[in-house]
Amino acid sequence: MTQLQSIPSESVRQLIERFRVFAANETKAAELRAARLRNSLESFWSGFSKARADWASRDQAEAPRFNLLRLLDLLSLEKNHSKILKDLLDPKGMHGQGTQLLETFLDSIGYGHLKAHLVAAHIEVKSELWVTEESRLDIIVRCFPWFILVIENKIGSPEGSSVDGGSTQTQKYWNWLKTQELRSDGERILIFLTIHGERAGAEQAHRISYLHHIRAWLEKCLEIVAAPRIQETLRQYLETMDDLRDLRKERAYGDD
């Protein structure tokens, strides 16, 4: 007699019935899971479609992705940053805000005490000013006879040295600054501006960064400027600050 024949027929029937109940329950559970999945998918696609429609509506009404500076790839070159910064710092710049933006910049780099001299002094702001046969200043702000501020701007390349491998650019610029006539209590300021706040060759240079100092300055400018055109340009420029982060790796501000 086989093992199956030894099992009572009643037990076989019970086993078959239990399997039938189990299979039926599993079928119902699978149907419930499928129904929940269908409802979830319907809800997801409904929400996704609405979100996509809302985004398209906002995109059309506000164009949050549009940034002319990014579109034209203007900010990978130092000279373009220098042009923007020069105009913002110039009281006679196209922004029409007088000395407000320059005053805010002086505050942001720790020279707010010089703002009082801007009222009656002659102010001259230039860019790309040649001072030797091989060196030119990216940005220079003269406030006669109180102070001279020079900005050496570095975006895509490290600080260079002279042809013979001697003085660094900032050292040469500091030597030039020392030759400029000012009052006995006048101040000569050399700023080394880089993406992250890299160290300068000249000990006298104050290092500042786009990601910290320039960002904070632009945000402060947004608070004080009411002109819509200037506000929008400042916002677009601010949006590009993070784009600079990976353009060049350098020793970060505060690293010793």
Image (tube, rainbow, N blue to C red):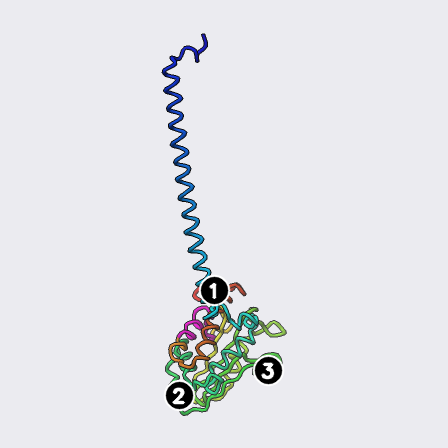
* CA distance separating discs 3 and 1: 54 Å
Image spot of residue 224 (x, y percent): 38, 79
Residue 207 visible to the viewer: no
- The residue beneath circle 1 is 56
Residue range of the region highlighted in magenta in the rendering: 204-219
Numbered badge on residue 117? 2
| Main SS category, magenta section | helix
Q: Are marks 2 and 1 in contact (CB under 8 Å)?
A: no
Numbered badge on residue 132? 3
Q: Residues within 10 Å of mark 3 (few under 14, many from 20)?
A: few
Q: Relative to 145, is 59 above or below?
A: above
Which mark is first along the chain, 1 or 2? 1
Secondary structure at badge 2 equals helix
Question: As shown in the figure, which amino acid type bears the numbered disc 2?
Answer: His
Which mark is first along the chain, 2 or 3? 2
Name the residue nearer the viewer: 153 or 246: 246
